Amino acid sequence: MYSTLAIKTNSKKSGRIIGTHQKLDKIALKILRKHLPEDADFPDIKMILNFEGMGGPDGLKRKSPGVDEPMHFILPDHDDGKLIKMIEDHQYNLKRALKKKDMVRAAFEAAWMAHAVTDGLTPAHHFPLVETQKELMTEKDFVKIFGVPIKGIMHGHSAPETLRNNWLYWGANGYMSKHVAFEYGVAITLNGLHSIHVTPKIEDSEFENAELHKAFYDSLEKISALDMYTKFRQNGWNTELAFETKNILLPEIIRAIVLTWASSIPEKK
């Protein structure tokens, strides 16, 4: 999902143009604040958003392409457990940071956890794009321009193969083109709505019994049942998808962020 369209890697305006992750985090934190015990510590939104955009997972992909990139893809029907393990690691570190009252580390973990949850629940991330990219990248070394590795160019063994592979990936109806177009549709839908229209109703009991694994997979089940990305690849963006995005997809993503954050609050002894 979009977190920044900034051109410069050190841009202070990272995420202000689209900033889907940032907008979802803002709504989620407002909900969480209403249910937190008065003595509970949690980083404020300004601190959390320091670790989005160029300070988040998307920024890492641009700064160091192909090096230790967090991959937030999941196949709902063939889950290998890698994404939930990543989210659980963030939860563990977030709990420790909150116990130590280390709000900087807590903000980092909260932001990266929310990013992983959001991507994992986004239908475009339910398609095996990473595997497809590896198949098209027949020459595994990145193409370099002035010595800088450029991610996103499908490097083939020859110039014709490179052209062919990039058309399949970036061309009309290409794999990445579809991925980007779907996320753009979600971003535009969110930008056109007031936060009240995508704010889920979460009962007090859900906060009291918040459990990370259940929160994530409950929302994943509801979203994957819609098969939104398959419909998008077949028919493009339409009013049905916009309706499902507004009424189900965005509220479920926000719900999952809130409850996974809530599950990370240390219990008071």
Image (cartoon, grey):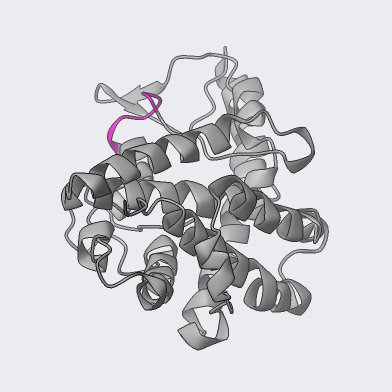
**Percent position (x, y) of residue 219?**
66, 58
Is 154 displayed left or right of 146 in the figure?
A: right
Please name whichever residue, 131 or 114, is drawn nearer the observer in this view of the structure.
114
Residue 185, above or below 223: below
The magenta stretch is 63-68
Q: Quadrant of residue 4?
A: bottom left
Drawn side of residue 85 relative to residue 169, left or right: left
- Residue 48 position by quadrant: bottom left
Which image quadrant is residue 256 in?
A: bottom right
Who's the residue at 49% across and 54% down the image?
260
Q: Which residue is outermost to the front?
A: 269
Label tally: 0
The percent position of residue 36, horizontal first and vertical second, equals: 36, 70
In the image, 152 versus 256, the foreground residue is 256
Q: Position of residue 195 (x, y in %)?
A: 47, 83
Q: Nearer the viewer, residue 224 or 44?
A: 44
| Residue drawn at x 24%, y 44% as measured from the top left | 97
Relative height, residue 24 to residue 192 (above, below): above
Residue at the location (17% across, 47% down)?
Answer: 102
Location of residue 40 with respect to 229 vertically, above or below: below
Above or below, comparing residue 179 to residue 138 in the picture: below
Q: State left or right for residue 160 relative to residue 106.
A: right
Is 140 magenta? The answer is no
Whether residue 165 is visible to the viewer of this picture, yes or no, is: yes
Q: Residue at 56% across / 79% down in the picture?
A: 198
